[in-house]
Image (cartoon, rainbow, N blue to C red):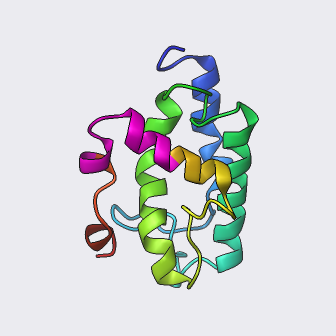
């Protein structure tokens, strides 16, 4: 599939439907804290992960548009990587890479690392960096 087309544009737009609302902007902790400064409630994060997992399942994955990475994967990656590192620090046991709770999302993380050569060392980063 092309990297960006009408279907990809729609999937990029689904981001607004999945991620928590009324959060403060931040370059290092986007969609993690409310405008008041407190963390987003665990249930809201769980809903975000459930919606994202379901969206990935719609086209058979492992990527948002299906078998190959496209624009939605690129657009969502920084936020999902932050979640993988930072949600366990905010809410004990909340792990986006948990294949039992979020099988399609866990498959997406694996596919991004296995399919895109520079992903693991350039985008994914490391837990220590994301935790700052």
Of residues 14 and 131, the one nearer the viewer is 131
Q: Is residue 56 left or right of residue 124?
A: right
Residue 8 percent location from the top left of the image: 58, 25
Q: Is 115 in the magenta? A: yes
Prevailing SS of the magenta stretch:
helix
When the figure is inspected, residue 76 is found, relative to residue 48, above or below; the finding is above
Residue in the foreground of this view, choosing between 66 and 52? 66
Position in image of residue 36 (x %, y %): 53, 82
Q: In this orientation, does residue 35 appear?
A: yes
Is residue 132 placed above or below 6 in the rendered structure?
A: below
Residue at point 63% right, 35% down? 61
Give the magenta-colored segment's residue range: 109-122
Residue ID at (38%, 65%): 26
Is 43 a magenta residue?
no
The C terminus: image quadrant: bottom left
Q: Residue shown at 50%/77% (left/top)?
A: 88
Q: Residue drawn 61% across and 28% down? A: 65
Residue 37 spot, x, y in % from top left: 48, 83
Q: Would residue 76 be visible to someone looking at this image?
A: no
16 over 4 or under it: above or below: below
Between 123 and 12, the one lying in front of the other is: 123
């Amino acid at each position: 599939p092309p990297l960006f087309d009408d279907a990809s544009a729609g999937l990029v737009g689904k981001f607004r439907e999945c991620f928590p609302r009324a959060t403060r902007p931040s370059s290092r902790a986007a969609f993690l804290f409310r405008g008041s400064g407190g963390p987003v409630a665990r249930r809201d994060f769980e809903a975000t992960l459930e919606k994202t997992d379901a969206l990935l399942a719609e086209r058979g994955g492992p990527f948002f548009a299906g078998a190959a990475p496209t624009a939605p994967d690129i657009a969502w990656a920084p936020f999902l990587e932050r979640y993988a590192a930072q949600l366990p620090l905010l809410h004990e046991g909340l792990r986006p890479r948990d294949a039992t709770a979020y099988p399609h999302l866990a498959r997406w993380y694996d596919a991004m690392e296995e399919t895109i050569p520079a992903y693991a060392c350039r985008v994914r980063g490391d837990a220590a960096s994301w935790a700052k």
